[in-house]
Image: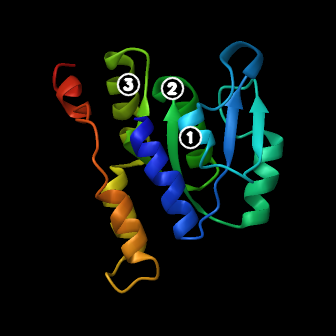
Amino acid sequence: MQHGCSILVRAAKCLELPVIVTEQYTKVFGKTVPELAEHLEGVERYEKTMFSMVTPAVEKEMARLNRRQVVLFGIEAHVCVLQTALDLIDRGYCVWVVVDGVSSSRPTERAVALMRLSKAGAMLTTYESLLFELMGNAKAPNFKAVSALIKEPRPEPELPFMHMAAL
């Protein structure tokens, strides 16, 4: 999961896409892991205690950015990612959830969260599929840079739908 998140953060820079980062109650859970933090230089972090990342400060930033599509990745799929996606869908956003960019403490929690997200209208995707869709064409600016990120060696992914088939 961290690999997928790292690729997405770095690709967002290449594609000049905004990134909003929230951190859940850092006194207890700590800050963003170093493997991601190193790629977030200059990106503001919004501390929160709400499970959804749709806090007043984040809503204000989203309004300023004037974007209606949101790509979500991070932890935990069954708590913060789920509640954020549901809040954004309720507000009329098109929400993409990157399945190889989310995790939960237990596989069943993740599987159920992904099912709920799909049924609620979130688009489930992988980081590779999403990035090619965002670029749309091999002639897109920064195609080679993003392609190089996608080609980086990756850990064997969890198969989220394998868990869902058992439910």
- The type of residue carrying mark 3 is Arg
Question: Disc 1 marks which residue?
Answer: 36
Note whether 97 is above or below 140 in the view shown.
above
Tell me residue 111's x, y (percent).
32, 26
Image quarter where the C terminus lies is: top left
Residue 66 higher or lower than 60, as above or below: below
Q: Residue 109 location in percent, x, y?
A: 39, 18
CA–CA distance in space, label 3 to label 1: 21 Å
Q: Which residue is mark 2?
A: 76
Colour scheme of the rendered structure: rainbow
Give me the residue at 68% from left, 27% from top. 31
Q: Quadrant of residue 12?
A: bottom right
Q: Secondary structure at mark 1?
A: helix
Residue 92 location, x and y as percent?
Answer: 60, 55
In this view of the protein, which residue sits in the foreground, 118 or 125? 125
**Dot 1, how many residues are within 10 Å of its Cα: few (below 14), some (14-19), or many (20+)?**
some
User: Which of the 4 quarters of the picture holds residue 99?
Assistant: top left
Asked if residue 106 shows in the view, the reply is: yes
